[in-house]
Amino acid sequence: MKKDKTPCKRYYRQRAHCNPLSDSYIKYPLNYNYVDWKLHYPYYFKNENIIENKEKKNENALKDIEYNNDNDNSKDQTDRNIINKETNKEINDLMGDVNKLYLNTNKHPITYDKIICSKSNNHEVKFLDIGCGYGGLLFALSKLFNDKLILGLEIRDKITNYVGEKIISYRNNHYPYYNNISIIRTNAIKFLPNYIKKNQIEKIFFCFPDPHFKKHNWRRRIITLENLSLYYHLLQKNGLIYFITDVFTLHLWVKYCFYKFPYFKLLSHEEYKDDICIKLIHESSEESKKVKRNNQNMYFCIAKKI
């Protein structure tokens, strides 16, 4: 069987730095009720959609058969064949949708123009990789936590396209794996509550974020005292934040923010020593591999919501 071609990274290069506080034209939903998660994780919704549509159409068609055809068995069989053909068509159409991308980019746009019923959103994202870059951590998490829906958030347009197209390629080449990861282009500092509801998330990852060295740019950092209030709101009780960087001063800044915020506790080595995610944040992302090649130090911390 011919494998899908993985996108080439060199065609998706984009400058690393941007201002998350500037005005942008990135679309966003009014609130999380407008986000249709089956567009991003179709594998988890396909059976429900097929069964629901099949039941409705079978019920309507069988009512017509009973009303119009008490004695004509040949017509009854014909109508039943029509029902089966329509169901098969729905399955084929749905499998085609699996390869369609909805990334909120110029190339793969999303519309957030209607409320999605809660029944259609009965699977929830549990892990967030904020500023996921080229998606190395997403793919590593997908293997180890295949029962969790994992979402990457990235502000850069081209890189979001790269990761989204790579996910589709991996889904097709390694079915049924990698169906639990997806990516959306958005500004997490501004629009994260428009996608995620209160007490929904188990783990949030921040891997090698922009350090914004200049003092007047510190407010742009992804972890500040103000932003910790947002992450606290979204995390479940005992939810975890993982942070890693190669910039020691940024590491000190983040630890200071956690110390000052009363509802997060920094974990000790004894508390996190058996956590497999520590290994992943040090080894799986593209930036961590680059730091390792250059023989640079990495600094990390883990905080728990209390």
Image (tube, rainbow, N blue to C red):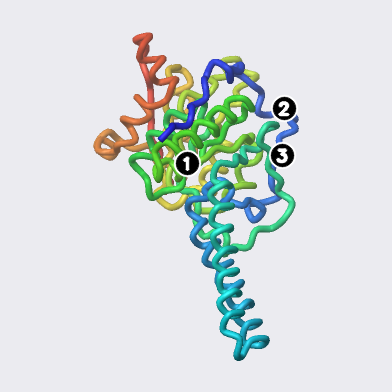
User: For the residue labelled by badge 3, is the local secondary structure a helix, a strand or a loop?
Assistant: loop
User: For the residue labelled by badge 1, is the local secondary structure a helix, a strand or a loop?
Assistant: strand
Frontmost of labels 1 and 2 is 1
Upstream in sequence: badge 2 or badge 3: 2
Q: Which mark is residue 27?
A: 3
Frontmost of labels 2 and 3 is 3
**In the image, is 35 to the left or to the right of 134?**
right
The residue shown at (51%, 62%) is: 48
Upstream in sequence: badge 3 or badge 1: 3
The quarter of the picture where residue 136 lies is top left
Q: Is residue 301 above or below residue 236?
A: above
To which residue does mark 1 refer?
181
Frontmost of labels 3 and 1 is 1
Per the model, the C-alpha gap separating discs 2 and 3 is 14 Å
The residue shown at (52%, 60%) is: 122
Q: Is residue 195 above or below residue 301?
A: below
Estimate how packed mark 2 is, as few (under 14), some (14 to 19) or many (20 or more) residues with alpha carbons within 10 Å.
Answer: few
Give the number of marks.
3
Per the model, the C-alpha gap separating discs 3 and 1 is 21 Å
The residue shown at (52%, 40%) is: 182
User: For the residue labelled by badge 2, is the local secondary structure a helix, a strand or a loop?
Assistant: loop
Q: Which mark is residue 22?
A: 2
Camera-nearest residue between 7 and 129? 7
